[in-house]
Amino acid sequence: MWPIIGHQWAVELLTRSIEAERLSHAYLFSGPPQVGKTMLVRAFAQAIQCQDEDVPCGHCRSCLLIGQDKHPDVHVIVPENNRIKIEMIRDMQRSVALSPVEGRYRICLISRADLATPSASNALLKTLEEPPPKVILLLTADRAEALLSTIISRCQVLPLRLLPTEQIVTALCARGLSMEKAQLLGHLARGRVGWAIAASEDKQVLAGRNRVLEEVTQVAEGSHIARFAWAQKWSSRPEQIPHVLEIMGSWWRDVLLLASGSTSAIANIDHSSKLSEWASRYGVAEAQKALRGVQYTAWRIEHNANLRLALEVLMLDMPGGARTT
């Protein structure tokens, strides 16, 4: 009944908790971005509040309202400008202090709790230390280690892992995708079922990825002037940089895998011929240097380095078009 792809162990654990009426006051769902945390958390909230015998039914009033983030007893917190602020936690505290209106519990869904400011984290800790009755907090985090250890210790932690490619491909085919497209998205997802579903529903995801890959080729074979122009262009779009670097890193990872003779599956299977050509051209050392450069640039930007300067340094360190000897 749960509308979840994969993570069956977590579904079974949560189902048993509901059936035994032994719910914890707080849960932490951790794991890589787009691995399915939010989908699982929402389904869990539906199962808790569901008015049917077989939970979550997906069609009762409670399930439908939770699916739309409109249930009166389910408070949802999502980051604003990549931050969860103390005002959001205080608003949540006022909400959970009230008795349930329609459901069995007051539930709060906190997305990306690892983005909470220090003051917000301390306020959240206070609620976890002294939880009101009939209140359940459901937290998600991409990086559990960024949370206070005292927050983690007061939650039941469910670490979600990347899914096998075959499982994602099967699920996409079941949703009506052709095998060819399902195979492509399954490999590109690299275990992130949320990304695969989003890409299957939005044609612009693949179109944008193809534009970035075209630029990757042009940059590698272009002059320093062209490379600096690329850095200038993307430095004016800071919100898109993590996505661009992820695509670039995926490309160079595939080049490295092929150059090293690894048996691991490449992600960009629709460009296998071009990747083989690059593997021959650049070799292991250059591919490894490029991949490390992309990863280091992403780390520097995440830690507030000057965006344009970081991208210009990356462009200077990218391999050139000459064949290795």
Image (spheres, rainbow, N blue to C red):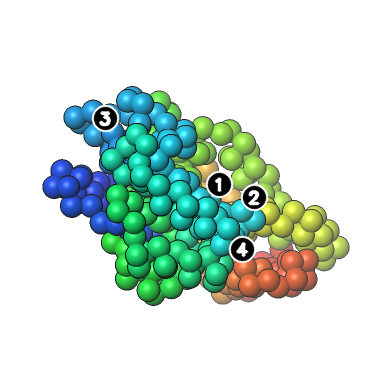
- Residue 6 shows up from this direction: yes
Residue on which disc 1 sits: 271
Under mark 4, the amino acid is Arg
Q: Which residue is rendered at x = 61% and y = 63% of the image?
A: 281
Could you say whether the residue bearing mark 3 is in a helix, strand or loop?
loop
Under mark 1, the amino acid is His
Tell me whether the residue at label 1 lies in contact with that at label 2, contact meaning CB atoms closer than 8 angstroms.
yes
Question: Is residue 40 or residue 193 the one in the foreground?
Answer: 40
Residue on which disc 2 sits: 213
Percent coordinates x, y for residue 11 in the rendering: 25, 46
Under mark 2, the amino acid is Leu
Question: Is residue 291 or residue 16 the one in the foreground?
Answer: 16
Residue on which disc 4 sits: 281
Residue on which disc 3 sits: 51
State which quarter of the image contains the C terminus: bottom right
Mark 1 or mark 2: whose residue is earlier in sequence: 2
Tell me whether the residue at label 2 lies in contact with that at label 4, contact meaning CB atoms closer than 8 angstroms.
no
Spatial CA distance of label 2 from label 3 is: 48 Å
Mark 2 or mark 4: whose residue is earlier in sequence: 2
